[in-house]
Amino acid sequence: MQASLSLSVSNPAAIPRSGHGFESSLPFPSKPVNLRFCGLRREALGFSSTSSSSSSSSSSISAYRSNRNAARSKKVWASLGGDNGSSSSAPKSFDYDLIIIGAGVGGHGAALHAVEKGLKTAIVEGDVVGGTCVNRGCVPSKALLAVSGRMRELQNEHHLKALGLQVSAASYDRQGVADHANNLATKIRSNLTNSMKALGVDILTGFGTVLGPQKVKVGKDTVVTAKDIIIATGSVPFVPKGIEVDGKTVITSDHALKLESIPDWIAIVGSGYIGLEFSDVYTALGSEVTFVEALDQLMPGFDPEIGKLAQRVLINPRKIDYHTGVFATKITPAKDGKPVTIELIDAKTKEPKETLEVDAALIATGRAPFTNGLGLENINVATQRGFIPVDERMRVIDSNGDRVPHLFCIGDANGKMMLAHAASAQGISVVEQLTGRDHVLNHLSIPAACFTHPEISMVGLTEPQAREKAELEGFEVAVAKTSFKANTKALAENEGEGLAKLIYRPDNGEILGVHIFGLHAADLIHEASNAIALGTRIQDLKLAVHAHPTLSEVLDELFKSAKVSF
Amino acid sequence: MAHLLQTSFLPSSPCLRANPDRSSSSTSSPMVQISRRRSKTGGVVQAKIREIFMPALSSTMTEGKIVSWVKSEGEKLAKGESVVVVESDKADMDVETFYDGYLAAIMVEEGGVAAVGSAIALLAETEDEIEAARSKAAGSSSSASSSPAAASTAADPIPAEITAPPAASAPIAVTPVAKLASAVHPASDGGKRVVASPYAKKLAKELKVDLAAIAGSGPLGRIVAKDVEAAAAAPAPLAATTAAPPPAASPNVELGTVVPFTTMQGAVSRNMLESLSVPTFRVGYTITTDALDALYKKIKSKGVTMTALLAKATALALAKHPVVNSSCRDGNSFTYNSSINIAVAVAIDGGLITPVLQDADKSDIYSMSRKWKELVDKARAKQLQPHEYNTGTFTLSNLGMFGVDRFDAILPPGTGAIMAVGASQPTAVGTKDGRIGIKNQMQVNVTADHRVIYGADLAAFLQTLSKIIEDPKDLTF
């Protein structure tokens, strides 16, 4: 508790309750789709943590029960050490130890860890449990991508022939594909709900609003108190102005995941992870795709070398073209027999460039935090472009630059790293702090993945970032690469296209970043992310053994090819 | 994307072209070997056109495959920039240039293979030299591509009789332009803009088809992939060159060389491969041509050609068997074509083209003969318009003038049937009254798409055709 509770509160003034328009705004944790990387942790009952070895659900539940009893017995646990200077309006006894606003993946991860640590926990949800990831993001999109991957294989006669397979014309049933995505989301959502219920997390239904320090309003008039509050309200798809979304021909990922239609020609505005994954789905199902990208190159955000290779494999040979360096200033849905029109201007000169006419447009320009109606004004917190400012321990910073006591924000709402598993990791980090163990999450150890075919994954710095850092701090950077072409398992699958890239310090063997493009890249990255998280050096990894023949040998070879100078 | 940029660990503006790593020996990208040649003009202005060579990326590498050109022709290059991606035995490598300049001409296309040390592109130092470099590249590639044109079995030479001078050389009223798929795209700004789907654009680039010359058949008149394929199938009229008909190819062929396809050969190759997806079958028939030969002899002086007579006879037979004039494009339905347009395969320099006699069942034999002459002249000058070579509904291919007595044609994609016509020659035949006589006979062999045209259909069609040819009075009125 020490670090987290010894806050000095500079603005203890009682904050009046005020009406906030949250009822009118969107349902809580999202409308969105966080298509990127959703590593949904703990969707099943049993979870393991670094501190406990519980591996079966029954043992973790029983462990929890005893903890919970302990928690109940000390309800006044509350105002300990750090409260000395804090608001006098804060009650001395609380309904809960921890309230989490938003039951997405971040809130869920935090809740489970909190229960394990013996905290009495409630989670507030204004929409459906699971948030973006489960309902409108990673989970349903993975269902669609699983279909697109198989379609791709079955349509690739050349590839099948090389394997000696013969398949006659593969086709699909759109509704069947859509149902698969929907069923998966439903299943994961119920797993998530059950896991929390079974552990005794109270699920409070209604929009959550922060009324003041340690006080949350749920729905219209229920007020609950908690020693600590975590905001985990997530994000919604960002739609730039000028774009009219009708949900039929101009859509966001929310609509696209329902797969209500498969247009002949769809423009995808934004070529980041979301756009890229959808291009994979749509082209596999027979659409042609036009990317509209504001930056000068496709796939910004990836290591340039990986991006280039990915473009060669994922864009160029497919039925995709693109316009880069342009903004879509106006997008009008199709109506009265007219197609969707997209007006493009040059991103630099702002000169009108071209008008596209397509059958549909998918807006994948990123995600905006969902923080409206949270009552942040009650605690003097000003959002920055909607994001809630936090420090490296996820503690919320108010408009004077001071920490707000007992208030944390995790996940997309703080914008540090908009990934489902990052939100969960941040939540666990907060709970660690609340239960007496200081913890700062190393975001450089959080892997990210894009589930195209083949997949792209990464952890740590890109090569340009690493070189910039090296220049500043005066160390040397080296790069090692291996190709999937040399991997037996990849060749057995006839999927030799791929590259793994290691960016490291030759002087001490520290891993700065790893980027993989190739078969099952998303699963391969964890060896590298764990090494970064645990500080394992390359010279030690070189001695580790990998089963043969496996794709993991790509990383084995990668580490072995690094030249560490001692 | 915005959110991505806000995350602290993702790059805000990665710089693709930066080659960050030249210091690190283990990973530095290979540089293209470039030889420098001064132009022969010498003099004060030193035109510097350099050849870009296929680099040796490993000690064991003898040849490399061009995975992709990072730069396109005419683009400016700065020293150190990636120009091309080459596949070596281990991995794909980006290859950079040592010199500033312009990528003037690409000599080995994507997917092509070149021996280590052979030129794969030309680099011009200034923009002015691009043209010079191009012509240099063209020179070297055109000599290379003068291989035998007959890339496919359907490559038929121009029938000999068309050279017979027609009596009527007066200007001919141009037949109405065939109805093209659709008017201008409503969004195309009155034709200023071309609306084509991404794949259509990609294909057009690959097949070097000019999108502006194609009418789209997709939603709202947009150009879709099949339109481009159709345009490429009938080889595009290459830019009208004034070059005289080149000499016969055979003396110039350098034996033992590997010659890349020309655009037209590429298009033919693609079409031939595409034809493999159509289940075809063949039905042959022997037709006595004594009466036809007699007719030809009689009206030859009026400019009538044998090609026109055969086309006319075929068209009349097709009129009675519309299913043989139908076509199946999507595998789910087929179209009874509204007009009977007979395409006739003609070999031209470097390939094969199929000028079309529109509405052959309705036009009279004399104007058809004149039309045919005009089409052949245009084909030789490479000035055929797309509707003059890609609107055929039935194809004729005639190798009779070589003495070929029978052969087998490949069905052009998008049509229902093609007829291979052999030479008419005196044949000893037994007649019904028990005698043996000599009759002129020719063998025809029709290849058809069995999804829509069945054996009995073809048989009936051929029977009708043989009756028309054996009693050709209907051909001339």
Image (spheres, rainbow, N blue to C red):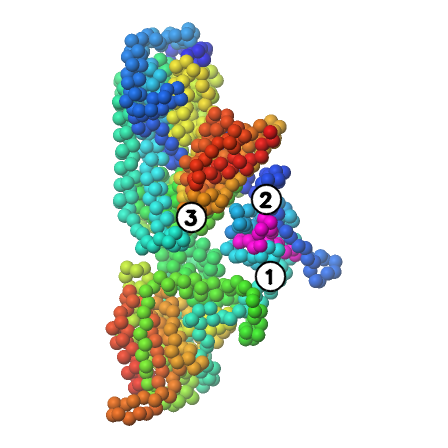
Quarter residue A120 falls in = top left
Please name the residue shown 41% across and 31% down the image: A419
On the same chain: label 2 and label 1? Answer: yes
Q: Nearer the viewer, residue A538 or A178?
A: A538
**Residue A405 appears at what percent x and percent y?**
41, 14
Could you tell me if residue A180 is visible in this image? Answer: yes
Quarter of the image that includes the C terminus of chain B: bottom left
Chain containing the residue with disc 3: A
Q: Which residue is mark 3?
A: A494
Q: Residues within 10 Å of mark 1 (few under 14, many from 20)?
A: many
Amino acid type at image mark 1? Ala
Nearer the camera: disc 3 or disc 1: 3
Task: Locate residue B470 relative to residue A407 in the image: left or right.
Answer: left
Quarter residue B440 falls in = bottom left
Residue with the most extreme right position: B44
Amino acid type at image mark 2? Ser
Amino acid type at image mark 3? Asn
How far is mark 3 from mark 1, CA to CA?
37 Å
Please tell me whether residue A106 is drawn above or below residue B466 in the rendered image.
above
Q: Nearer the viewer, residue A108 or B374?
A: A108
Element under disc 3: loop
Element under disc 1: helix
Q: Which residue is mark 1?
A: B137
- The range drawn in magenta is B49-66
Q: Which residue is mark 2?
A: B29
